[in-house]
Image (cartoon, grey):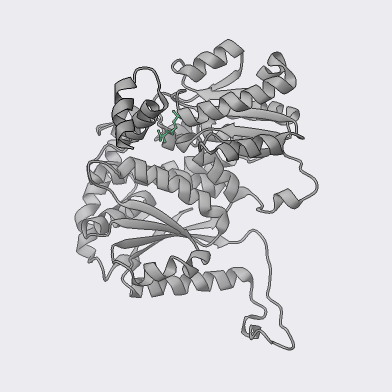
Amino acid sequence: SIIKVSIDKIYGILEPVDLELIKERVEVSNRMLSDGSGDGNDFLGWVDLPEQITPAQLDAVNDCAKSLASLAEVIVVIGIGGSYLGAKAVLEAMSDPFQLLHKKQDKPIVLFAGQNLSEDYLYELLAATKPYKLAAIVISKSGTTTEPAVAFRIVKEEIETRYGKAEAAKRIVAVTDAKRGALRTLATQEGYATFVIPDDIGGRYSVLTPVGLLPLAVAGINIGELVRGAQDMAKMTAADVPFDENPAVQYAAARNALYKKGYKIEILASYDPRLQYVSEWWKQLYGESEGKEGKGIFPASVTLTADLHSMGQYIQQGERTLIETVISVEKPRHSLKIDSDPDNLDGLNYLAGKRIGEVNLMAEMGTMLAHVDGGVPNIRIEIPELNEYYLGALLYFFEKSCGISGYTLGVNPFDQPGVEAYKKNMFALLGKPGYEDEGKLLRARL
Ligand code: PA5
């Protein structure tokens, strides 16, 4: 398989029978995703999405990306949650972290906005982009989310002031619902090019729609390969693939069996800082899908080995409610060896001739055994390397396993009713029309 899930390091904490007991349940959950018999079945468009993406659709995204890239040196991608994290995750995973130091930038720089309400963030973004030719992609399925709407108002104003309204319309692309929402109305009115987020695909499952594909294409990512990876993973995780060959059910079974035994926090660990935002994307996916009705594994993440010098202490010896799931990348993109030093003042000659990746791998193996010995069950997800194909496979694998996990837990993995509570309070406190009474009550409590 292109993704290998190893769950043998949960034994000792779980008995094989614990897993046996849940196997059937996860397979039923997988069937519920394919036959649409579960809750939230009007949000299952992502399940067969990879195989439904046509070359013409990819061409349309790539063409639009090319035209934006020809106009701009900096492209601001505006969105939050599922309308942001997928693109950010793949972009970070594929990027050279030091790209900005390279003199020649042959692709536009993609920056993100609308994922926070920090005044300084937006101010500094505007200030920093002043010398550069600018364009924007604004993404919101509902078209009414406050954070991206605020950021877009500011960035739109900047682009219009610089280039005039007509030229601005060529530099702004909107990704939103086919008909509903303020962003759709605005895009129609202003004459922006648009892409549609299908009705039956929720934000956190939308990375393979133009929500993720357009910003990635603009940054020069091969979206065809990303989709191909997802297509292959969709086949490998289909409901008729037996448990032992199906990584999505294996992962769902392991984490749900552990949850039943009181393991309530899952830490996604990676040994490459470029995967930090894959973890952020994963946290949203699992946290929003499972955390409801007083249930759900709390998703957390660490980047190792860095966090072994901070969170490592807790993981080794803190409360024993942790699951550690490691994304392990087999092959680094580059090769770098440690040389022998005649003086050996740092005492590192025992590493001479080894690649840094080998040292990292031994850190990973040693940490896994130490944490398992400390009472933290370990799940290992291996991918061969960080490229578009394997990332596409990984993202789809996590989506599939999340849907299965949610159904196994007994919740609707495709809604997020809890997200509304903060919005209501924020609107009331800001004096949005219709929230006056609520506003009075809340202000009295502050
Ligand atoms: O998964 C989800 O549905 C959410 O996290 C949304 O993606 C997020 O709230 C942004 O919503 P919208 O795209 O409507 O602006």
Confirm whether residue 54 shows in the render.
Answer: no
Question: Would residue 155 be found to the left or right of residue 162 on screen?
Answer: left
Residue at the top extreme of this rendering: 189
Residue at 43% in and 65% down: 311
Residue at 28% in and 29% down: 441
Confirm whether residue 221 shows in the render.
Answer: yes
Location of residue 200 in the rendering, given as x and y in whole percent from the top left corner: 38, 26
Location of residue 228 in the rendering, given as x and y in whole percent from the top left corner: 54, 40
Residue at 25% in and 32% down: 37
Q: Nearer the viewer, residue 171 or 11?
A: 171
Q: Quadrant of residue 134?
A: top right
Residue at the right extreme of this rendering: 103
Residue at the front extreme of this rendering: 444
Q: Nearer the viewer, residue 93 or 247?
A: 93
Location of residue 144 in the rendering, given as x and y in whole percent from the top left corner: 45, 23
Residue 323, placed above or below residue 372: above
View quadrant of ligand 1 = top left
Residue 192, placed above or below residue 103: above
Q: Which quadrant of the figure contains the N terminus? A: bottom left
Question: Would residue 432 be found to the left or right of residue 25 on screen?
Answer: right
